[in-house]
Image (cartoon, grey):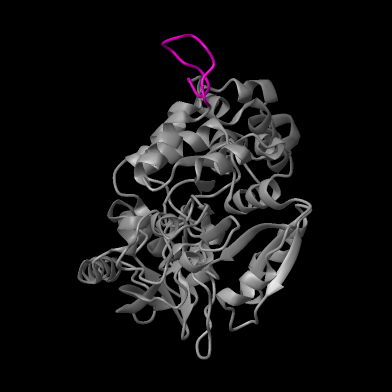
Amino acid sequence: MTDPRRQVPRTDVLLADPRLADAAARLGSARLKATVVAVQQLIRAGELPPEGAVPAVLARLPGSASSLNRVLNATGVVLHTNLGRARVSDSAAQAVHQAGGYLDVEFDLASGRRARRGRGALAALAQAVPAAEAVLVVNNGAAALLLAVTALAAGREVVISRGELVEIGDGFRLPELVESTGARIHEVGTTNRTTLADYAGALGPQTGCLLKVHPSNFWIDGFTAGASIAELATLPAPVVADIGSGLLRPDPLLPDEPDVTGSLLAGASLVTCSGDKLLGGPQAGLIFGRAELVERLRRHPLARALRVDKLTLAALEASVQGPATPTSRYLHADPDQLRRRCERVAAALLDCADPPDGAVEVVPSAGAVGGGGAPGLELPGWAVALPERYAQALRTTQPAVIGRLERGRCLLDLRCVEEAEEAALIAAVRSVGPG
């Protein structure tokens, strides 16, 4: 009997196979060689015929050099933190691709001299929020607040309501963030009620700023009271308003969500927020406000450590100035159109040789803003309901499909699935197969 080890194709021969040339260019020689070696081992073990080496290598190679997997978000949650929050627009993705090369991020083509970094993105944000005298961009929302508190209140006091000492996610708590700047927290009021007099009574020579935090991922009903930004602006101290979700202007769909423009017009000295939530852009921290304060933040040594890269600046500018973002479209999706799409998908799933086992129904589905925005707000919509077992199986398809488990069923809500992606979703469900 012939020893199968003698039939193993040589490594150099496999690496030189023209069928693997594209993979080498896309993934790099090290990744390709590691996969070739793994396939050779299968041939040595007699688990694969030698002539199947190249197809086996191709089957085992990932689609890209990144370990991140493409996902179809069928949860109905627009800003799903675990799925990357906001889906950026096609124009933003194209801007990122272009920014991968050399570009004039900090260079003036006309004069040949150094220029203000990210001036295009800053100008776009300033144009979108005329109430802001100046704008600054850092790498996320927490960084924006960190820089503001550090520049204004390090070694001094930050006055804040007890009801706004929130946890911002993944165990990070606002008091710890503020204290890391070297500032001291001066709590005022109670969990459910804080008045303007509470803030006024706390002011003194050690006051660095008043901090107003929007408790974006929860709400308190009943016997409550809080001082507004307009009220706080009457006091002799800078007001820093952390609104969280990055809504630049009022949106009738989100009447209880604070926006940057309204907060500035109410008298906030600085407004901080995130770029990858309701703005619909990349992860970034945005700071709007009075020119002298923004400039103080910009010149602080910490600003250098928190600055964003050219890819973020490109995506941010395109998100602000380009067409409507996916976030905006998904939030304002027409429920009737969502129902028609669900019915089309359900019909396609039933009209095949191996339809899903169990019932396939089109059912009402309440979507959510997500990302800590507009807690409790339900977005009317529809979903395709499948048996519960599909939820786990669909997470292993390419692309992965992430649905929502509800009452023993797997719901595929199409709110955040583009129409052009319906075919991939249908194919994924069919690939799971019945039973």
| Residue 191 placement: quadrant | bottom right
| Residue 175 placement: quadrant | bottom right
Q: Is residue 38 left or right of residue 240?
A: right
Where's the C terminus, which quadrant?
A: bottom left
Question: What is the tally of numbered marks visible in this picture?
Answer: 0
Is residue 114 shown in magenta? yes
Rendered location of residue 51, percent (x, y): 57, 34
Please say if 130 is above or below 188: above
Please say if 8 is above or below 187: above
Q: Is residue 286 left or right of residue 430?
A: right
Is residue 376 shown in magenta? no
The one nearer the camera, 42 or 216, is 216
Whether residue 359 is visible to the viewer of this picture, yes or no, is yes
Who's the residue at 28% across and 55% down the image?
Answer: 419
Rendered location of residue 172, percent (x, y): 70, 63
Dominant secondary structure of the residues highlighted in magenta in the image: loop
Who's the residue at 75% across and 52% down the image?
Answer: 181
The one nearer the camera, 147 or 42, is 147
Instruction: Identify the magenta region.
Output: 104-116
Q: Is residue 194 left or right of residue 317?
A: right
| Residue 110 placement: quadrant | top left
